[in-house]
Image (tube, rainbow, N blue to C red):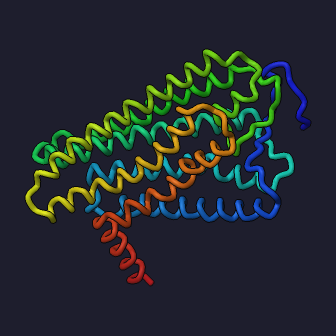
Amino acid sequence: MGDRGTNNHSEVTDFILVGFRVCPELRILLFLLFLLVYAMVLLGNVGMMTIILTDPRLNTPMYFFLGNLSFVDLFYSSVIAPKAMTNFWSESKSISFGGCVTQLFLFALFIVTEGFLLAVMAYDRFIAICNPLLYSVQMSTRVCTQLVAGSYFCGCISSVLQTSMTFTLSFCASRTIDHFYCDTRPLQRISCSDLFFNRIISFSLSCIIILPTIVVIIVSYVYIVSKVLKIPSTEGRKKAFSTCSSHLGVVSVLYGAVFFMYLTPDRFPELSKVASLCYTLVTPMLNPLIYSLRNRDVKEALKKLEGKKNTIL
């Protein structure tokens, strides 16, 4: 279990996740914070999926996408949080080679899927507001299913490429990962391979994933804003904007952290850990809160569900 060098990646049996470099007192506080946030992630996203599945009024494309978003949030935070919390109390802080591969693969799969789902949700709002008469045709059940399946497919392809590219590197310098989970950049730091082409491909892959989704979101909202501003009534404009503001809030938090993490120079590991927290735990925690607090349909469905519970009790 020592931190001795190895000749190549095939001889590495495990890695050590350094996590956050803090004193023991702060470690307890961080553990409790992680535990609280993860509990809210579980409660919020499971609750959101339950509400969407049980209330017939929410059987619409927008809530179908939102349900999938909650599913993705739940699972990619679950890939990271339990291991990170365990390592707060572990002496070795180790993760097996296979565990590291699995963690990176699943995290990449779900985070990329989330990006495409957010683009799909922006397109859905564009159709709903700019072409309401064609909404039922253009966003049919078949189309919605294909869009969600396509998001998962893109996430899977990206994850396979990213994971295979990362774990073909040689890790002969060290096996100590200066992060709280297995991610591409921290693994590149401990590799003794030539990273020039690897970094170019990694950066290109990030651009291919992030830029098209951002373009879809921006173009959709440019059309949405121009359409909404033409609505004569203040109430009508307010209602239209309220359906979009929640989505924009989620997009801002997620993409802000992702841009900092993957499209900026890798010079500040500790800042990278903070940015990673934003999209591994903070965003999955905030998504259900943002959508429930600013969405009248979800509020009414929640009240209805509470009413049923009180009736049963």
Residue 265 rendering spot, x and y as whole percentages: 60, 31
Residue beneath the point at 58% across and 46% down: 275
Left/right placement of residue 237 relative to residue 144 reads left
Residue 7 lies, with reference to residue 188, above or below; the image says above
The quarter of the displayed image where residue 293 is located: bottom left
The quarter of the displayed image where residue 179 is located: top right
Left/right placement of residue 53 relative to residue 234 reads right
The quarter in which the C terminus is drawn is: bottom left
Residue beneath the point at 69% across and 27% down: 188
Residue beneath the point at 39% across and 42% down: 117
Q: Compare residues 111 and 244 and report the one nearer the observer.
A: 244
The quarter of the displayed image where residue 10 is located: top right
Residue 25 lies, with reference to residue 280, above or below; the image says below
Residue 203 rendering spot, x and y as whole percentages: 53, 25
Q: Compare residues 268 and 65 and report the one nearer the observer.
A: 268
Q: Is residue 142 visible?
A: no
The quarter in which the N terminus is drawn is: top right
Q: Is residue 282 visible?
A: yes
Residue 74 rendering spot, x and y as whole percentages: 52, 52
Residue farthest along the left direction in this orientation: 232
